[in-house]
Image: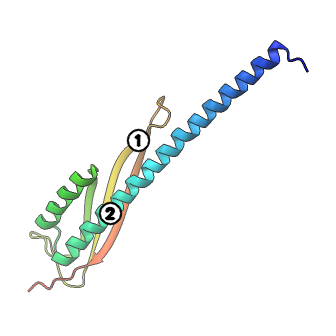
């Protein structure tokens, strides 16, 4: 069978289009994977902070020091929001058995294809009960 020049060119074009589509899928997969690892790191930070807060019974200095260490370790600097019924608002003390809720929010962009970026907000929320009795 004799191939004409146009049939050879169509084969080359098909190959180039297939390679470009494969590359776009790889870039998309890498971006999705990076968001999954980012979410996993945020969950780790939230679990560690809520554990520290519930054991200490407050959401101030010790928890802030732990947050700074976790931010340095992971390279993620999320916004932190605490919700609790404080026994002492000034000292941020939470009474034994009262719930403490932590919400981490991180703003990032989906930069997969280089031409545009889509803003994305990731959130991690964890809750725990204070384990310290305050007189």
- Labels 1 and 2: the sequence-earlier one: 2
Q: Which residue is mark 2?
A: 44
Where, quadrant-wise, is the N terminus in this rendering? top right
Where residue 37 sits in the image (x, y, percent)? Answer: 41, 54
Residue at (75% x, 17% y) in the render: 9
Residue 39 vertical position relative to residue 55 in the rendered view, above or below = above
Where residue 2 sits in the image (x, y, percent)? Answer: 89, 17
Which coloring applies here?
A: rainbow
Whole-Å distance between the Cαs marked 1 and 2? 21 Å
Residue 6, labelled with which disc? none
Residue 74 vertical position relative to residue 54 in the rendered view, above or below = above
- Near-viewer residue (98 or 69): 69
Q: 10 Å neighbourhood of mark 1: few (<14), some, or many (≥20)?
A: few
> Looking at the image, can residue 57 be seen?
no
Residue 88 vertical position relative to residue 115 in the rendered view, above or below = below
Residue at (18% x, 62% y) in the render: 66
Q: Which residue is mark 1?
A: 109
- Near-viewer residue (119 or 6): 6
| SS for dot 2 | helix
Q: Residue furthest top?
A: 5
Q: Is residue 10 left or right of residue 25?
A: right
Residue 55 vertical position relative to residue 36 in the rendered view, above or below = below
| SS for dot 1 | strand
């Amino acid at each position: 069978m004799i191939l004409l020049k146009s049939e050879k060119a169509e084969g080359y074009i098909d190959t180039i289009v297939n390679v470009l589509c494969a590359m776009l899928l790889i870039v998309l997969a890498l971006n999705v994977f990076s968001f999954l690892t980012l979410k996993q790191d945020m969950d780790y930070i939230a679990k560690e902070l809520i554990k520290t807060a519930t054991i200490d019974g407050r959401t101030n200095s010790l928890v802030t020091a732990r947050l700074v260490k976790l931010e340095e370790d992971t390279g993620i600097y999320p916004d932190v929001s605490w919700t609790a019924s404080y026994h002492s608002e000034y000292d941020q003390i939470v009474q034994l058995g009262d719930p403490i809720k932590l919400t981490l929010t991180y703003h990032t962009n989906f930069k997969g294809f280089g031409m545009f970026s889509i803003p994305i907000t990731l959130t991690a929320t964890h809750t725990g009960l204070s384990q310290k009795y305050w007189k």
